[in-house]
Image: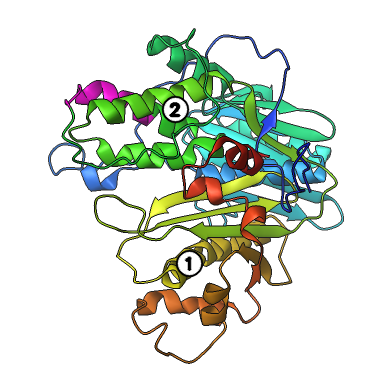
């Protein structure tokens, strides 16, 4: 529970954490690498090339959250090529090795970067020595930087951030001295594809939004705004460009934001889901948002427009809950590979009573006949895999993923 002075306690976890630690240092430079983009390969050009595996950011953050919860240290290797055994069936870039009565080592690969952690210092050292004997690589020691993220490891917590990246972005956009604002978007401002405003340079707009999309790797507070802005990559107007600059001004005032994962918290997967109804100004489609924590700190989150128009608030919430359940099932598999099998059903907090009622009613009736059948799998998941639980709207921490909120509500959702 996190309590903001002057407000009611918010049930959930701490999503954003402010730090005043000195994070000065140069920007880490990365080598150019071919990534997994099979859909772009062409015969006679690169059709027969083999591309490197890329770990999901959700997997990386899950590993960091687990290490913090167990008070393990994270280490890093830089390797030109690696071929490991015992691969996870849930995640192609994840490897786990367990020796009974000794401990566990968990390894995640992102192209030629390896992050590893575990409970046994003996097994960790053995893994590092074996890898360095067999492959050309560099021992980078404790994990400090990874994929543009800064990683601060303390005895009782791990804090991840992108302060350096954010500063570089502001410098590039000539906004390092701009006046900050308290929210990424103006709550009363509606953005749509055709607003009859003067067009701006597409390339400049795309670079800003693309950079913001990468910044959300540790900043769920800008998830909704960047996802919204990404809809206007073609033919952006001055209004869209102004909204993007406002997000940058918000970043200027929150450079020390990131996510904190603490040790000693209950090793329990908890989710929140939310939706709006017909919020898109262009096609009346609704938005879904969800977030998951494991002990402390969010490690998986989404804000996205639903694929089809729905006919009621209950249906919008039902689709959002089904999408959250899909992610929850995958996260349970990954945590099981980590040795943290979730025995009990995972609670997913929802502020829509009608959504919960529909999900727990096995019969198709008037209120659910228009819902796509693929979303009804949640009814099977209710039986021991997920448990939709009602929470009041003011206690839902994922409102920031579905709406542009006023300052007080937004600040409460960030804590």
Which stretch appears magenta? Answer: 198-210
Residue 4, percent across and down? Answer: 75, 38
Asked if one can make out residue 136 in the rendered structure from this viewpoint, the answer is yes
Residue tagged 1 = 317
Q: Position of residue 100 (x, y in %)?
A: 82, 58
Residue 129 appears anywhere in the view: no
Q: Which picture quadrant has residue 345? A: bottom right
Residue at horizontal 24%, vertical 50%?
282
Q: Which residue is at the front of the view, 25 or 180?
A: 180
Q: Residues within 10 Å of mark 2 (few under 14, many from 20)?
A: many
Q: Is residue 294 left or right of residue 238?
A: right
Residue 205 magenta-highlighted: yes
User: Quarter holding the C terminus?
Assistant: top right
Task: Indicate which disc, 2 or 1, sits on the residue closer to the N terminus.
Answer: 2
* Count of number-bearing discs: 2
The residue at the point 28 percent across, 29 percent down is 239
Principal secondary structure, stretch drawn in magenta: helix
């Amino acid at each position: 529970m996190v309590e903001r002075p002057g407000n009611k306690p918010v049930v959930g976890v701490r999503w954003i954490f402010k730090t005043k630690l000195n994070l000065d240092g140069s920007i880490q430079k990365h080598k150019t690498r071919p990534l997994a983009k099979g859909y772009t390969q062409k015969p006679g050009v690169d059709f027969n090339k083999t591309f490197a595996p890329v770990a999901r950011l959700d997997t990386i953050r899950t590993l960091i959250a687990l290490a913090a919860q167990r008070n393990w240290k994270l280490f890093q290797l830089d390797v030109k090529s690696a071929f490991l055994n015992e691969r996870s069936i849930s995640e192609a870039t994840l490897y786990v090795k367990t020796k009974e009565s000794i401990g566990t080592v968990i390894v995640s690969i992102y192209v030629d970067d390896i992050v590893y952690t575990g409970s046994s210092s003996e097994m960790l050292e053995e893994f590092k020595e074996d890898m360095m004997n067999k492959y050309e690589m560099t021992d980078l020691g404790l994990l400090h930087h990874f994929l543009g993220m800064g990683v601060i490891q303390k005895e009782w917590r791990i804090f991840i951030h992108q302060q350096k990246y954010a500063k570089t972005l502001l410098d590039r956009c000539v906004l390092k001295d701009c006046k900050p604002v308290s929210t990424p978007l103006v709550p009363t401002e509606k953005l749509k594809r055709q607003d009859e405003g003067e067009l701006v340079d597409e390339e400049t707009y795309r670079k800003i939004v693309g950079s913001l999309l990468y910044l959300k790797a540790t900043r769920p507070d800008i998830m909704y705004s960047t996802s919204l802005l990404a809809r206007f990559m073609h033919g952006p107007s001055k209004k869209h460009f102004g909204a993007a600059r406002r997000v940058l001004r918000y970043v200027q005032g929150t450079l020390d934001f990131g996510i904190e994962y603490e040790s000693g918290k209950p090793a329990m997967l908890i989710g929140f889901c939310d939706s709006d109804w017909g919020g898109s100004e262009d096609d009346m489609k609704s938005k879904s948002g969800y977030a998951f924590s494991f002990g402390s700190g969010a490690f998986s989150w989404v804000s996205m427009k639903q694929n089809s128009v729905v006919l009621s608030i209950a249906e919008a919430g039902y689709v959002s809950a089904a999408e959250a359940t899909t992610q929850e099932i995958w996260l349970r598999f990954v945590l099981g590979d980590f040795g943290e099998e979730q025995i009990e059903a995972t609670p997913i907090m929802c502020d829509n009573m009608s959504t919960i009622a529909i999900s727990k009613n096995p019969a198709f009736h008037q209120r659910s006949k228009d819902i796509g059948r693929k979303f009804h799998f949640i009814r099977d998941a209710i039986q021991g895999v997920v448990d939709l639980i009602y929470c009041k709207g003011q206690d839902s921490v994922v409102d920031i993923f579905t709406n542009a909120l006023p300052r007080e509500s937004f600040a409460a959702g960030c804590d």
